[in-house]
Image (spheres, rainbow, N blue to C red):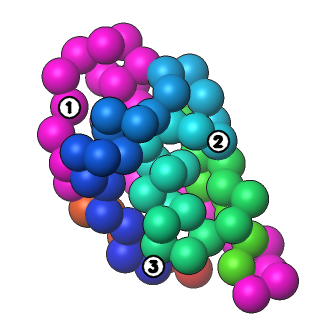
Amino acid sequence: MKISVTQHHIDAGARGSCSRDPIALAMKDAGAEKVWASPTYLSWWKDLKVYNVPTPEVVWRFMKLFDNKAPVKPFEFEAEL
C-alpha cells in the first residue's frame, strides 16, 4: 500500500498520538481503517482484515522529528502487506 503524507496531514496531525499523527491520517486517506502508527509497527484494518507491519525507518524518523517539533516535509512510503 502506497502512503502519501501531505502537508495537510502534517498540519492536522497531533503530536504524540498513534491514531491522529500525520502517518495515521495519511493511512486513513489511503483507505485504511482503525489505524495505529507507532515507531515499532503500523496496524490497520482494511476489507475486514487486520494488518500489522514493522514501521519503515523513514516513517519512525519522521515521527521522531514531528513529535519533537522539528521541521518535517511531505513524503511517500510503502506499507508492505
The amino acid marked with disc number 2 is Ser
Camera-side residue: 7 or 16?
7
Q: Is residue 68 above or below residue 41?
A: above
Q: How many other residues sit within 10 Å of disc 1, few (<14), some (14-19) or many (≥20)?
A: some
Q: Nearer the viewer, residue 50 or 15?
A: 15
* Disc on the earlier residue, 3 or 1: 3
Q: Are marks 3 and 1 in contact (CB under 8 Å)?
A: no
What whole-number distance in Å separates the C-alpha atoms at marks 3 and 1? 22 Å
Choose the circle earlier in sequence order: 1 or 2. 2
- In the image, residue 48 lies in the stretch drawn in magenta: yes
Q: Is residue 12 left or right of residue 55?
A: left
Q: Which residue is mark 3?
A: 1
* Stretch in magenta: 47-75
Q: Inspect this view and state whether residue 58 appears.
A: no
- Callout 3, which amino acid? Met
Please name the residue that numbered disc 2 is placed on: 19
Q: Residues within 10 Å of mark 2 (few under 14, many from 20)?
A: some
Question: What is the secondary structure assignment of the residue under circle 3?
Answer: loop
Compared to residue 13, the image places residue 8 above or below, namely below
Helix, strand or loop under label 1 = loop
Q: How many marks?
A: 3
**In the visual, does 33 lie left or right of 22?**
right
The disc label shown at residue 72, or none: 1
